[in-house]
Image: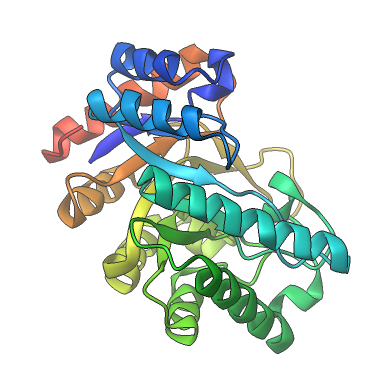
Amino acid sequence: MRLGATIGDYLGTEDPDAHVGECRRQGYRAAPCPEVAVGDRDRIRDIKRAFGEADIVIGEVAAWVNPLHPDVDKRRANRNTIAERLALADELEAVCCATVVGSYDGSDNWDSHVGHHPQNFSEEGFEAVVEWVRQVLTEVEPRRTKLTLEMSPWTLLDGPEIYLTLLEAIDHPGLGVHLDPANAVREPRIYYATTDLLNRCFDILGPWIRSCHAKDIHFALDARTVAIEEVLPGRGVLDYRTYVSRIERLSPDMPLIIEHLATEPEYKEVGDFIRGIANEVGATI
């Protein structure tokens, strides 16, 4: 696999050469794309050059907007944004363009991961997701990348089984899977069975998986009801031995991107943890 990280969280620059230099310093072979406007031809060329010469894969182009926004104009704008980012990913030959299925609660950007609304789980919600994904894929028709969706417990896409149902309903070669299994841990039975969850994800979705995120989960210590919080990989319950093993079996070039951390030392801690697991199970980094 190719370990990477959202280094832009702490690097303080979007310069592609700086991103490549940091990847080399930290031993990463994958990273998200630095920020770039869709029409900035010179910068797109510079990003492709810098990453290509260093053999660092652009693991994802992010499109974290809400395609189910209840406001008609905002919904249209967000879907256009996803289409533009998908076209950019295709031009950059990135592994994928990562987004979410959306939420009816009106949240946007990262909030669309956690926006909760009862209509998210309705038949109407399912059909709306199928419709917007088909619309974007038909408009862009990506040839060198995939549109991928991220699971979230508060949206329709909350586990591998519904992901397969969506893949079959949309039925387009431009759609793939972005796997973030921590987001599929939505209740205690799954919390205590992450090995089974991981194996189901890879058994069910394996042919479509294009990239993965590295996060972890732990129960919230002060909660009186079910509450699961995100923690650094290695500090939670996600079975990383199974996770890394299944990634390596699927593809030695699969990006595994560490994300959502605040500081460089935290990224180093997680990187060292995953490298140790990879060494144990015989996976490449």
Q: State the colouring used for the structure image.
A: rainbow
Front residue (pair 222, 278): 278
Q: What count of labels does the image hold?
A: 0
Q: Is residue 162 above or below residue 255?
A: below
Locate residue 66 relative to residue 47 in the image: left or right: right
In the rendered image, the quadrant that contains the N terminus is top left
Which of the 4 image quadrants contains residue 46? top left
Locate residue 158 relative to residue 33 in the image: left or right: right
Q: Is residue 26 above or below residue 254?
A: above
Residue 106, percent from left and from top: 85, 60
Residue 195 in sight from this viewpoint: no
Residue 40, percent from left and from top: 56, 34
In the rendered image, the quadrant that contains the C terminus is top left
Q: Is residue 17 above or below residue 5?
A: above
Residue 119, percent from left and from top: 79, 77
Q: Residue at x 24, y 34 (%)?
A: 277
Front residue (pair 152, 129): 129
Q: Residue at x 56, y 15 (%)?
A: 13
